[in-house]
Amino acid sequence: MSGVVVIGAGVIGLTTAVCLAETGVDVQVISDRRPGSTTSAAAGAMWDPYLAEPAALVERWSRDTLSVLGELSAETDTGVSLVEGTHESRLPRELPPWTRLVKARPCPADELRPGYVTGWRYRAPVIDMPRYLAYLVRRLERAGGSIRYRRYATLDEATHGPAHVVVNCAGAGARSLAADPLVDAVRGQLVVVENPGVRSFFCDDTPDADVLTYIYPHGDAVVLGGTAEPGSWDVRPDEDAARQIVLRCAEVEPALAGARVIEHRVGLRPVRPEIRFTEESRGGTLVVHNYGHGGAGITLSWGCAREAAGRARRAMGITP
């Protein structure tokens, strides 16, 4: 046996494959969808640690990923930009612990949007996901890795091949692939509009809010969100939900009210009570599970990918 198979062409799978390929490992990504059709492509997105478990891993992975994305923002073809903006809440709340990583500062009252009572301002990576995924594919191919499009119905199909190690980055698909009933989908929808001049990001961070409201500028376009519908696996855009998204965002940023809609995106966040980052042996093949990141895939991507790649290399007898 030789080489590694990575299942999944979203941000977790592609980043893991890049980490392997760039250390000389023979790696192939297997996916039933092209990167531009994955849930990752439908993300907003920005570095923003969601509440996820296990907390110790999430903290470490978030910090490591922030460092890498900061470096990538200096390159022109990555889709990563450092943008300043605010998180604001309609209820009093303390700054989350992760804000120390980005040196966030509390917003004075005159900086808050109408209806908001507290908030914090900081600068962080904002990612144009279609561009970023295309960048990861180019980087993987330059390092000698490849992508093949097919669907595995079970993990046994993957482990019966020639790979020494299989890394399972199937996202919500792990529910069936790994027979893991703890995985569920949280449907997310967003709207992409022409940018009327928005330069700062905004995120409503009100505790237990009924809806999501966020605004992420990407040059000539702005991503508006969003929805979070647990247990919904429907990837068709909902016209009424799209209208409500635009209305909520325009209430925060009035310039968005008349912006032309470019596209609608829908993705299925792979939610699990705890991220699965474990190993198991199947017929002599090591399987490294790396899925269940919910809406924090981009935020955790480089940290967890490096650790998953390290586990695969050790299983193959490759020292760091």
Image (cartoon, rainbow, N blue to C red):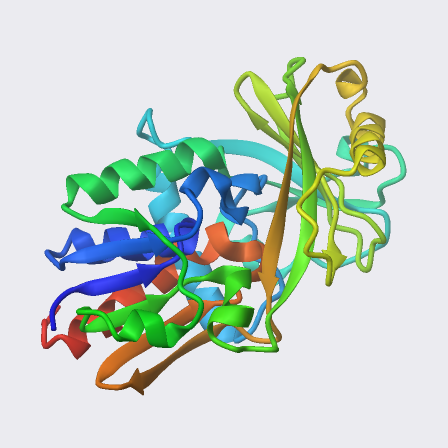
- For the image, the number of numbered tags is 0
Residue 206, how many percent across, how many down?
80, 52
Above/below status of 218 relative to 69? above
Q: Which of 206 and 195 is in front in this view?
A: 195
Q: Left or right: where does residue 280 sit relative to residue 100?
A: left
Residue 153, how many percent across, how many down?
44, 67
Q: Determine if residue 80 is in view.
A: no
Q: Which of 307 and 139 is in front in this view?
A: 139
Q: Which residue is drawn at 79% across and 58% down?
A: 207
Residue 144, how many percent across, how many down?
14, 46
Q: Determine if residue 219 is in view.
A: yes
Quarter holding the N terminus?
Answer: bottom left
Q: Residue at x 81, y 20 (%)?
A: 254
Q: Quadrant of residue 122?
A: top right
Q: Left or right: where does residue 217 sit relative to residue 130?
A: right
Q: Left or right: where does residue 253 sit relative to residue 310?
A: right
Q: In which quarter of the image is residue 116?
A: top right
Residue 224, how many percent across, how many down?
69, 32
Q: Which residue is drawn at 70% across and 41% down?
A: 236
Quarter holding the C terminus?
Answer: bottom left
